[in-house]
Image: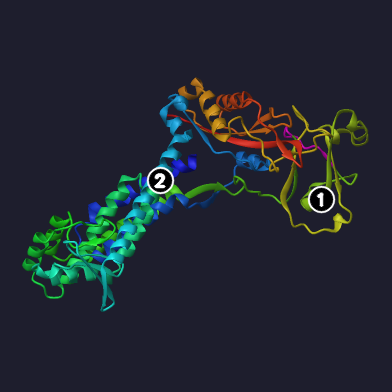
Amino acid sequence: MNNFINYILESGVSLGALAVIYYAFLRNQTFFRANRLFLLFAVVFSSLLPLFQFKVFGSSGQGNALLAGSGTSNMLETITVNSSGFSNSLANWISTSQLLVYAYVLGAIIVSLIVLVRLTQLAYVIKKGQLVAKSGINYVYIDENSSPYSFLNYLFVSRSLENQSGWEKMLAHESEHIRQGHTVDILILELISIFQWFNPFFWLLRRVIKENHEYMADRAVLNQGVAVNHYKEILVTQFIGNQFSIANNFNSSLIKSRLKMMTKIKSSNQAKLRYLMGVLMAFALVLVFACENRDENFAENESVEQGVQIKSANGEQPLILIDGEMADRDAMDKLDPQNILSVTVLKDASAALYVEEYGELAKNGLIDITLKSGALDSKNNAINDVVVVGYAGKTAGADDPAVFNIVEEMPEFPGGELEMRKFIAQHVKYPVIAQDNGIQGKVYVTFVVEKDGSVGRIKIARGVNPSLDAEAMRVVNEMPAWTPGKQRGQNVAVSYTVPIDFVLQ
């Protein structure tokens, strides 16, 4: 859900910022072709920006290394808690409610139908009219009394047009729309409108793109030697009939700005430097929204170390045996998870003999790894595919040999992940002591959904402050039982990490 909210906000901010650049620096310039490219870039770029994600690696830190070592791959979306108690407020409801998704989809469907109806209407007019090809342009003669309009390489002309003064200038104007390919821009806009219908900045830029099309066609006609005053008179007096918003129309509500632009003095070449403002703004938007700071030793949903990782839940390293022989770090680094036949976690009486034999080495528990035949000669070509957790709190035993990251049937919170996010957001309380001392930050809590669906083995993978850490653990501990995960038809334990971001208002 956060991804959807981010798309709305980031695309809206991007379109708004680029619209400000255009209106403040470029709209009154006579570089119509450059403006056309800038405006199309603004709309397409802003629609795609939220989908971009570039990794920017920074320096390593102890907290990040700790989180990487946990081996957790089920990183849930961040849940934000605000100091003003927004967990139950409109801000949190917006970030979790599916009503927004339903409204967005409904709007997209409606806009899609509108676009389809407009295209169907034009197709009907083409089929009904008389088609005549001239100089690479398909003239469609219609009985309706209207000003000419164009779409793709079709120029729609009323049969009574020749009775109108200046009719040849109208056709010249529409011919320029066809030659300059303005319909391609319009089709791109119609497509993007399906996804950006909610964004007022999109409709604003859509209007100025069409406005710029008119400037370009007007300029081309005037460059053919047509007198400005004569052309203005035609433009003012010849607005008649229906107009298709998806087509280029000879006359429109933009007439006042078009008349003004016809006599505007050509902009100087130095004014082209203003387009650098747009480039700098686009670069800034990429830095703000698309670049994600990632520590070189920590990446969500990514593995960072070679070999098999064995971690006990209390952070202490258990004794590890490979085919009955004690394994050192070098042996673990060279171990290929694909060659593991079985992993047995021993505790209590089952580990007594090993404790007697290895003494202090086995005080934190023991994990016995059995390899497939001939596996010791295998190449080291695997990355962190096996993680075994045990020996603290609820420990993994012989009947529960591993805590999984990914299983065939993942655990499910009652009502789904949306309800889980609502539960945490509604139950977390920003500690007063943290608010008073200006403490904020993101706490990463790891937990295990056990075979019976209960939530256990809760710990802080990366903390911020004891008060925030304790509150995050408290809420996770209060979660109701999940539907347990299954692997090969058997219930298994599955680990998760949930980031809870405490933000001061």
Other-residue count near label 1 (Cα within 10 Å), few / some / many at <14 / 14–19 / ≥20: some
Q: Mark 1 points at which residue?
A: 331
Q: Is residue 256 left or right of residue 453?
A: left
Q: Which label sits on residue 467?
A: none
Q: Mark 2 points at which residue?
A: 10
Q: Image quarter for residue 36? A: bottom left
**Residue 466: % across, % down:** 58, 26
Q: Image quarter for residue 344? A: top right
Secondary structure at badge 1 equals helix
Q: Which residues lie in the magenta part?
A: 313-320
Determine the residue located farthest toward the top in the rendered image.
432
Identify the residue shown where x is 26% and y is 79%. 135
**Residue 50: % across, % down:** 44, 49
**Mark 1 or mark 2, which has the lower sequence index?**
2
Dots 1, 2 in contact, CB < 8 A = no
Q: Name the kind of residue labelled 1 in the image.
A: Ala
Identify the residue shown where x is 24% and y is 52%. 23
Which is more toward the observer, 43 or 134?
134
Q: Image quarter for residue 401? A: top right
Q: In this view, does 127 lie to the left or right of 380?
A: left
Cα–Cα span, label 1 and label 2: 48 Å
Q: What is the magenta segment's predominant secondary structure?
A: loop
Identify the residue shown where x is 59% and y is 32%. 463
